[in-house]
Each structure stands twice: as structure tokens, then as C-alpha cells.
Image (cartoon, rainbow, N blue to C red):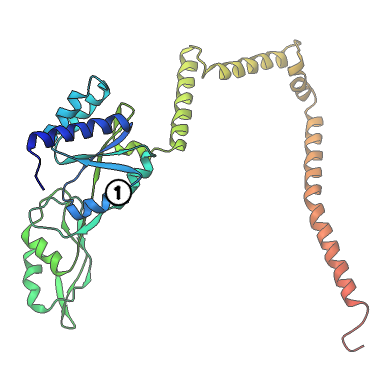
Amino acid sequence: MVREDKATWKSKYVMRLTSLLDEYPKMFLVGVDNVGSKQMQQIRISLRDTAVVLMGKNTTIRKAIRSHLDSNAMLEKLLPHIKGNVGFVFTKEDLSVVRDLIMANRVEAPAKAGAIAPIDVFVPAGSTGLGPEKTSFFQALSIATKISRGTIEILGNVHLIKEGTKVGASESTLLGMLKIYPFSYGLQVQQVYDGGAVFSPSVLDIKDEDLIKTFVESVANVAAVSLQIGYPTAASVPHSIVNGFKNLLAIAVATDITFKEAEQAKEFVANPDAFVAAVQETVQEAAAEEEAPAVAAAKEESEEESDDDMGFGLFD
């Protein structure tokens, strides 16, 4: 099979990328560090019929996007993020669902010497299964151990590697002997593109309940500020109306002025004992209604016991 020359390959790649940019309104910009070809193949298979994965060189990607800005100027927002080892995942499905599929395709990996730790690594306390001849590895890392039943036992949990630091040769060797694979690698979602907007993937974790809660709190803040400075807004008008009605009610109670909505309040001030009696009567009626089912159930139980007895003893 004749291999295509470099110019032809670049031309076909640009056409492929621009066609995907036209076809798919949503995409993920993903990092592919430490992702092997076999794992990439598994990722493509898992995303089949849901998304399209496309990798490429950054210079070629930038060239394709710049040549397509006349058709879609919003793509320019992607250019600052085309750096490092990145690629695209195009989709028409729900972004949260596809993001979860991407993050699910991860494989465990050992801590290789010289690699930057993406997470903190801890070695748990307990027996290691290693013989006493391996004690020097633990001593080099200042890990407290003892010999128990012919094997090395770690006395306490050890924070071996801190996030963001380089893995040393001793740490890598020790984790390998303990068969601890602390890291996991896969596609890392760096940015999300949706209809011309580029945003962090953390936005996908925001739920409708969070938006409603934030909106309600914001409306309450606007209403409070508007009431304080005396500037009416749609958020403060209902509170202003209620406060105005309270003022009218107070005036009506303190004077001979009356109106329909104030009659009950004036009656209460004039004869509070009558309202106390009415409230007590209401409470008693509610209590009686709650006790009625219990009394009826007790009566039915008593009748059933009477029917079972039938007036005879066990030896009659």
C-alpha cells in the first residue's frame, strides 16, 4: 500500500476536521497524556454511535480552525486552548452523559520514576508480604516498619507522594514491589464547546436545583437592597405592597377609620377573648377528629375479641 505524502495527509485532515466542526455543534477538548494506542482504541469503541474522537497535531488543528473562521467565527475561542497533547470529542448527545462515558474509560497505571503525580499517594499500614531483606527500601524513604512473622509490616499510613511532585526512583520501586498502581490515565476533559461558548467542564456538574437556589437568593438580595434604598423593582414591589398594607392596618386599628380588610383586626383588638374562645374550640374539634379513628379501631378490636370468645371456655 502506497503511503500518502505529508501534504495530502494534512489536506485530508483539515477537510475532516472542518466537516466535523460543521456537523457537530458540541465538542470536548481533551488531553491525551499517557493514553496508549490500545486504550485509545477502547475509548473509540465505547463512544461509537455517541461521539467521534479526532486527534491531530496542534499546528494542523490551528490551521484548520483559522481557515474555517469565515464560516464560524466562534471557533476562534478554541485557539487559546490548543496547546499540549490534545484532541477533540465531537457529539450531538447530552454533554454530561458523554463526559461520564469519557471519564469511565480509565486504566490503572504504575507510578513511573520521573512522572508528575496527578494525585496524593498513600501506602497503607499493615503487612507488606515482603521479606526482611527489603528493609533498606523502607529505610531510604524513612518509613517506620517492623518484622512480624517473617515479613515487613508498616506501622502507620504513609503519605509517600504529594500531588504535583515528581515521582522518585525509590518511591516507584517500592510501589512496584507492593503492587500498588496509584495512578489512572484516560482522556482528560479540559474545555467544553457548545454552540459558540467555551467553558470549564465543571459547569456540567451544576444541576437545576443549584440554579434555582442561586436565583432565589439573588432575587432576595435585590429585594433587600431595593427596600433599603427606596428604589422600587420587580423583586421589591410585593414586599412594598405588604408593608404598605401593614401601615394602613395599623392606622385603621389606632383610629376610627375602617375598611373591609381591617374589620377583623379591629374586632380582635376590641374583643380578644372572643377570638381566644374560637381558637380553643377549633383546637378541640381538630383533636376530636384525630381521636375518632383510634376510638373506632379500638371498638372494632373489642367486638372481634367478643365474637371469638362466644361465651365458652377452653374446656367447656
Q: Is 242 left, or right, of 36 in this rendering? A: right
Task: Quadrant for the C terminus, please.
Answer: bottom right
The residue shown at (81%, 34%) is 278
Q: Is 109 left, or right, of 136 in this rendering? A: right
**What x and y, as percent, mark residue 160?**
15, 59
Instruction: Check disc 1 and give the amino acid type.
Output: Met
**What x and y, as percent, mark residue 243?**
60, 18
Q: Label 1: few (<14), some or many (≥20) within 10 Å?
A: some
Q: Is residue 83 above or below residue 120?
A: above
Mark 1 lies on a secondary structure that is helix
> In the image as oriented, which residue stretches furthest toward the front?
1
**What x and y, as percent, mark residue 190?**
24, 39
Q: Is residue 127 above or below residue 294?
A: below
Count every numbered label the image shows and give the total.
1
Nearer-the-camera pick, 40 or 175? 40
The residue shown at (22%, 33%) is 17
Q: Which residue is mark 1?
A: 103
Q: Is 37 left, or right, of 214 in this rendering? A: left
Image quadrant of residue 131? bottom left
Image quadrant of residue 69? top left
Nearer-the-camera pick, 5 or 100? 5
The residue shown at (81%, 60%) is 297
Nearer-the-camera pick, 27 or 197? 27
Image quadrant of residue 23? top left
Q: Is residue 279 above or below residue 259?
A: below
Q: Is residue 143 above or below residue 310?
A: above
**What x and y, as percent, mark residue 84?**
14, 39
- From this viewpoint, is residue 154 visible? yes
Q: Is 279 left, or right, of 167 in this rendering? A: right
